[in-house]
Image: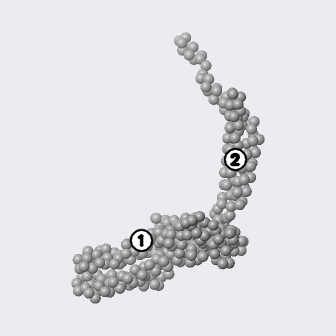
Amino acid sequence: REKTMSTASEPENPAHYDDEIDLFELAANLWEDKLLIAGVTAIAAVFSVVFALLQPNIYEARALLQPKAGQEGGASALARQYGGLASLAGISLPSGSGQSKTQLALQVLKSKRFAYDFAERHGLLPALFALDDVEPSGVLRFDPELYDETSDSWRREAEPPRQAKPSADELHEAWSELLSVSEDKELGFVTLAVKHRSPALAKQVADWLITDLNEALRAQDLAEAERSIAYLEDQLKTTAVAEVRTLLASLLRSHTESRMMATVDPAYVFAVIDPATVPEKKVAPKRALICVLGTFLGGFLGVLLSLFRRALRNRAAAA
């Protein structure tokens, strides 16, 4: 019993009090350096406000698209179904990959070749690489040290192997900042969004992209249909097997229908459900968030400076 009483009367671990004393001492030290911390925080707040105000407004134009139904077509299905029969007769049937045109169109949209051809066709390279300012009227002003609008010539200095005029590789790097595409897997809708400092140009680029993408896929399928029709007509002239002739006739009819649809339908791959409009509100930069984060980082830096200065003083006193 006495042993128990003596144990209970022993003092608690003094490290607990040391930790509390250290915390109080830390708070006291920070309070002593309150002017330093406040000064650093204020400077960081001012710089963050200036930085936020200097950032140009970015606008986003969005369009909602619906993939056209029946994009794979019947020719591919027929070729897959009766390809064995045709091969026995010594005929190699032309057929598509069976890939959804929606997925194909999305990959084409992200491709380097389509991006550069699109930018060249619509004269977008200066707006992406040499833009200096956008006037309230919507007129684009270019940096004369990068691009001469009068002579349509590039003047920027670039390290080899890059040239003054932006290349397809450079454009492809900037393409993801300009364009974003998202697909609703459940409903099938596709949202196309274009970001730029000019709201009018963002809307115009979105419209151009939809038109050019439909046209690119339509031209590709038209060329494929013409080649397939020519091939099938030749095979019909030289094939005597009734079953194979029936198959070739079905394929010919299917490719003819595909050619007709590609000719008459301007919205070949995507139909516009909600067209892009000129955005009125910016989507970036988040100036309030920049100011808050800048001020917070300034306060954190002030605390670190206070602790660093206190550590140097303690080391000097110990020496």
Which residue is farthest right? 35
SS state under label 1 = loop
Q: Which residue is mark 1?
A: 100
Residue 105: x and y in percent read 47, 72
Please give the name of the residue rendered at 63% of the width and 72% of the height, measured from the top-left corner: 154
The answer to whether 239 appears left or right of 290 in the picture is left
Q: Nearer the viewer, residue 123 or 300?
A: 123
Residue 64: x and y in percent read 54, 71
SS state under label 2 = helix
* Residue 173 badge: none
Residue 129: x and y in percent read 62, 68
Q: Is residue 23 above or below residue 170?
A: above
Q: How many marks?
A: 2
Packing grade of label 1 (10 A; few <14, some 14-19, many >=20) is: some
Say which quarter of the image contains residue 151.
bottom right
Residue 263 in sight: yes
Say which quarter of the image contains residue 119.
bottom right
Q: Which residue is mark 2?
A: 298
Say which quarter of the image contains residue 315.
top right
Q: Nearer the viewer, residue 247 or 215?
A: 215
Q: Is residue 11 above or below residue 157?
A: above
Label 2 – label 1 distance at C-alpha? 52 Å
Q: Is residue 69 above or below residue 11?
A: below
